[in-house]
Amino acid sequence: MVRRRPFAAFALALLVLVIVTCVAAPLVAPYPPDKTNLLSSLQGPSLSHLAGTDKLGRDTFSRLLYGGRLTLLYAAIVSGVALLTAVPLGLISGYRGGPVDRAIMSVNDIGLALPVLVVVLVVLSVFSEYLVIAMAALGLLLAPPMLRTVRGAALAVRRELFVDAAVVAGLSRPQIVFRHILPRVRGPVLVQSAIVAALAVQFTVGLSFLGFVANPPEASWGSIIAEGAQVLSKSSWMLLFGGGITAVVVLCLGIVGDALRDIAVGSWTRESTAASRRRRGRRRVAAEPPAPAPRPASSAALLAVRGLSIAFGEDEDLLVARDVNFTIEPGQAVGLVGESGCGKTSVARSIIRLLSGDGRVVAGQIEFDGRDVLGLSGADLASYRGGSVGYVAQMPMAALDPTVRVGPQIEEVLRAHESISRAEARERTIELLAKVRLPKPAEVARLYPHEISGGMAQRVSIARAVAAKPRLLIADEPTTALDVTLQAAILDLLRNLGRELGMAILLVSHDLGVVSELCDRAMVMYAGEIVEQGPVDDLLFAPAHPYTEALAACRPSSTTVRDRPLLVIPGQVPAPGDWPRHCHFADRCSHRTEQCVQRPVPIEPVGKGRESRCVYATEMLREGTREKARA
Amino acid sequence: MTRLIVRRLLLAIPLLIVVSMLTFVLTAVAPGNPAAAVLGPEASAKEVDALSHEMGLDEPLPNQYMTWAGHAVTGDLGESLVSSESVGEALSSRLPVTLSLVIGSTAISLLFGVALGMFSALRGGSVGLLTDVLAMLGWAIPSFWLGLMLIDLVAVNLHWLPATGYVKFGESPLDWARSLILPWVTLAALGITGIAKQTRDSMREVMGREFIASLRGGGVPEWRIVLLHGLRNAAIPIVTVTGVFAIAMLGGAVLVETVFAMPGLGALAVTSARAGDLTMLQGIVVVIAVLVVIINLLVDISYGWLNPKARLA
């Protein structure tokens, strides 16, 4: 903890120091707390009086220590009562469930709604002689939020298997609760303890400021503040020190509590995994060869992606895509295929400048109709998005704002690109909804996203993406989240829209078959690289890369070669940062030889309009032709 | 939605019953006679008996409560044990002070908290760190102490604003606002920082969601995305937290009103507690509990407005 969280360690040390010094006040305080000296009243800090003196010339530093004793003692009582109430009841509530849980929680809800300070004042006025009772009441009133947390944690632990196992093993209920569940909820309990302790200090100081805790001449932090408030026009020192020490203690408790929470959840936080991934990535990518220089694109291309590399993370080295090159001609439908985790979504999203989180392009160029896409900003970027390129996201439901009706979400896009009236936009929206073949488009426009089905949401999403008549539509797994019966309909819709609007389509999919239904050409991506590209039929029936071959064989379809068994590719895509230096697919490849693992494999033309990143590409093609000839 | 509100109101009933029984139960289990406590140590046994009878303390507890509750539902909360003032009148004259304080502080907290939180969510970096530090400080600094420091600085040293006191809105709206600025800021300090933190967290979460990317992909202007889509989707936890802080501010009013010498419910609670004026405290507790119920109800209603799905409930 000291090395990982120096700040929290310092706070903890400071806290311990304050507590120990206050408890040991009779030993360490330079003066007795009530020793008056009217000759030196209301002095500022000096060597003989570290925190100055009060109206009666008493040493404020000594009074802070003695006052701290009293304050911390009562705060400890308050926290103790809160803990002893919240932890057992929370455990029982979470573990037992049912009516016991409901009973405890409904009382707890009432407790949560009580105005703490006012109720404590009532208790104080009834039990004016017995401060401890009021403090215990304060503890009870601070228990409900903690109880709720403990219950939640116990509930989560109970649902885990090992408690069931303990029941089977014949352990008694109290044994299970205290031996198995309590240790597991220790994290949240510690965090809540820090919070409750901080609140206890604050309330105790507040009450003693109001004059309910310390009886003069006894000191407490609150009474020192109150005395300081009375002499405000003459000296601010007592006010400053009395409140300052309180704030420091509460602050330290807060910092320690935060650190405890981070430690409790630390093992699986994104932060730590991202950091470790970055570390791994750094080691790995240092060995990657530099990306080759981008090649010139054909001038007819609508979209040209050249030497594109995309990275995530703070450093530039966690690549998710490397040296990606392809072009899309106007009106052409092109597929981008690969397993999940290959980087195809990142490539697709970079085209419309929508990389999520801290993802960004680290090398390469994207040109749309001769314009540099990566350089766009402001109004140009806004008109490019939606106006030049439309985007249909993977999960149709997640792509719609749940709090806004369907129609206005499309109207918004229309009005972003054309200066039309609200009424006109509404009319056009209904036309668009009809165009994506939604029955009763006017009614659908008035529905909220949660009131429509996934298939309808996908049509709405598509309508929105084509609203401003883009020349390229990017559809990221548009059918994956949908029912099989809907898939064909959506693909059909995309095909017709493409034809009707003269719109090029980039279809991202893990399914080579889906791509083959819509596209003429496709790129196959594996572990951040394009491993093969060419006409879809060639990829399906005469693959020039073992990965394409495996993808084609994975499809249970009448279009694949029949006498081959349905394949499952063994292993999984290596994570970004774990890519090997040599052929990325080598570890899972059935054709692998020594040659594959020696050096990086470049992508090279194989035949007309085709490229492959495999040292055996030519052999594969030759063999494929031979097999076909035999059949 | 209606069902949600009705359920909330039904849940409020046990709360109000528990709260209203508080003093009765406490007096019953407390040692000593509350009448004696009011009269002080010099009172004779006869005087104590007389006051006990007047307070109904010689009746059985359920009868005492039923008598009080019967009057309470008609708006009669009894008389102060100390000053014989009508509790209802005392409360209604002080309620506007506390409401001005709490509503103003809540509004300030919401405005500045959301602004700071959004700025921090969208800019991140040093602003994010600043929000964290402010949130920690806002939580750690006792509000009444902050109030005293503000008095020291702004009123005593700079003479910009009155140190203490309260001017009724009807007398002079300007002086009313001037008398409230320091208390508002004092009480809002906690709320601003807490709301800022919540706003930042939920804005960050929402701005990372797919529909935000899809809106950007459609070329929708960024200000519309942030304000109309982002903030609206982030609003529910922000409103929840605002409700929590509004309730906390009702409690904080006890200290802040005392510090600024404002004649509100909180300051009245302190003087009543010092004097052992139980009927007055009883009334204050009930009024504050009703305010808590109203705050929770407002939060629930806003859920329905913010989230179309909640309207079905």
Image (cartoon, coloured by chain):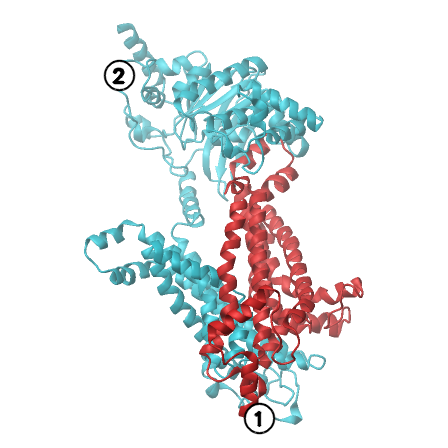
Chain colours: A cyan, B red
Instruction: Report the side of B230 relative to A195 (left or right).
Output: right
Q: Position of residue A69 (x, y in %)?
A: 48, 81
Q: CA distance from mark 2 to mark 1?
A: 106 Å
Is residue B282 placed above or below A292 in the rendered structure? below
Q: Position of residue A484 (x, y in %)?
A: 39, 22
Q: Residue sitting at 64 percent across and 80 percent down?
A: A228
Whether residue B134 appears in this view of the structure is: no
Q: Chain of mark 2?
A: A
Q: Position of residue A24 (x, y in %)?
A: 45, 83
Instruction: Report the side of A500 relative to A110 (left or right).
Output: right
Instruction: Report the side of B104 relative to A404 (left or right).
Output: right
Q: Residue sitting at 50 percent across and 54 percent down?
A: B10
Q: Residue sitting at 37 percent across and 15 percent down?
A: A540
Q: Residue sitting at 75 percent across and 63 percent down?
A: B177
Which kind of residue does numbered mark 1 sit on?
A: Glu
* The N terminus of chain A: image quadrant: bottom left
Is residue A212 placed above or below A521 in the rendered structure? below
Q: Position of residue B188 (x, y in %)?
A: 64, 61
Frontmost residue, B214 versus B257 = B257
Q: Dots 2 and 1: beta carbons under 8 Å?
A: no
- Give the labeled residue for mark 2: A564
Q: Chain of mark 1?
A: B
- Give the labeled residue for mark 1: B42
Is residue A130 placed above or below A490 in the rendered structure? below
